[in-house]
Amino acid sequence: MIAENGRRKVTKGRGATGNPEGRFARTTHEPVDDGWEPDAPAPDPRTTVTLEQARSVISRNTSPDLPFDRSVNAYRGCEHGCSYCFARPSHAYLELSPGLDFETRLFAKANVAEVLRAELARPGYRCAPIAMGTNTDPYQPIERRHRLTRAVIEVLGDCGHPFTLLTKNALVERDLDLLAPLAARNLVSVALSVTTLDNRLSARLEPRASAPHRRLQAIRRLAAAGIPTGVMFAPVIPAVNDGEMEAVLAAAREAGATRAGYVLLRLPHEVAPLFRDWLDAHLPERAAHVMALVNQARGGRDYDARFGQRQSGTGAWAAMVKARFDLAWRKLGFGEWRSRPLDTSAFTPPRPPSPQGELF
């Protein structure tokens, strides 16, 4: 939607500025002024949560540039509303928009714990760490009510299965009572994604995620509880937040983070036009410069999906980012506390439920 000043209309508390159809949509929608209320503003979208029954919950991947081969996502869509989220195109498979639909029309897998328990109990299952937070955030605001991430952690803890968590939300502190004992058994590690230290920029980039100081506080509390905790400076956005890399890493290290990583801005499928619209709405004076640097790091395109390059990019600007990260990583001492692999030897498959109960 275009405002009278020619800039994209911003909806308070939302990251996307519009709701374009996804690439698999069978129908298109176009607003039409019928003349009855020409000055009436469009209603702000409300968050809805649809409960669904999942048939399977462990997703597999064979990507050579990912440090895990399986993941669990209790939710589809994410209320955080990060304007740059590379998971937005997944809503297109539901014939919904990767725009505002992705952050307002959410789905919760109500039976995720039960299905996970059944999948872990299969005779052919082989244990390896499960990643959470790889597509949508496990601690997005609706987790307060639905508590599905907590239920998944309880299942994994009961059978000694290792897992990792990645989040932008300080709600992870709620589950310290579960995470701390599992960390003592080397079964869990956590990372907080911190994109900026600027509250105002964060509110525009990721409007419903925790404020930067709360994420740093969560790192501090997790680390104090003995949980291996890291920081992800992700995504690195040229001419927007890239200048804060060293400051973010230093703040996280001071808070107790012992691991660090970064990911260059990724703009697959519908995310590219959505992010361009976000730039036009919030940073119009530098939008062209930002995208010129993005294109430089992506071989002249908005995105390069090739393995080994999609996370860090190519070219002079991407090389400079890597050099800066490597230098800060060494100077801050992240390299001196390399995390040991999570323990897979403690895994005991859950017993399948039996109508006759258990004798022992």
Image: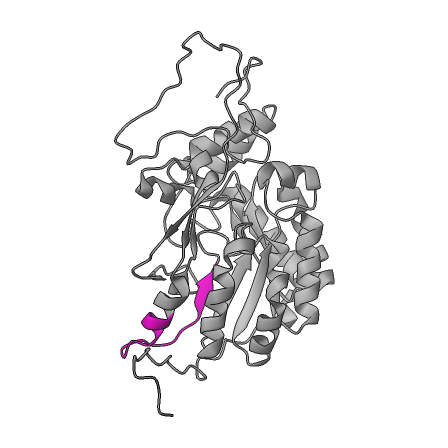
Q: How is the image coloured?
A: one colour
Q: Nearer the viewer, residue 104 or 53?
A: 53
> Is 130 one of the magenta-colored residues?
yes
Vertically, is 42 above or below 177?
above
In the displayed structure, 317 sits above or below 351; it is: above
Q: Give x and y (percent) for residue 194.
A: 62, 51
Dividing the picture into quadrants, the one containing residue 72 is bottom left
Q: Which residues are magenta?
A: 117-132
Question: Is 5 located above or below residue 346 in the figure?
Answer: above
Residue drawn at x 33%, y 72% is: 118
Residue that sits furthest to the bottom in the current view? 360
Residue 281: tell me if it is visible: yes
Task: Choose top left, top right, bottom left or bottom right for residue 201.
Answer: top right
Nearest the eye: 330 or 75:
75
* Membership of 338 in magenta stretch: no
Q: Quadrant of the C terminus?
A: bottom left
Residue 338 visible? The answer is: no
- In the rendered structure, the answer to whether residue 133 lies left or right of residue 360 reads right
Q: Position of residue 45 (x, y in %)?
A: 49, 32
Horizontal relation, residue 322 to residue 73: left or right:
right
Q: Residue furthest top?
A: 35
Q: Residue at x 49, y 61 (%)?
A: 149
Q: Which quadrant of the figure has residue 129?
A: bottom left
Report x, y in % for residue 186: 54, 78
Where 225 sits versus 216, above or below?
A: below
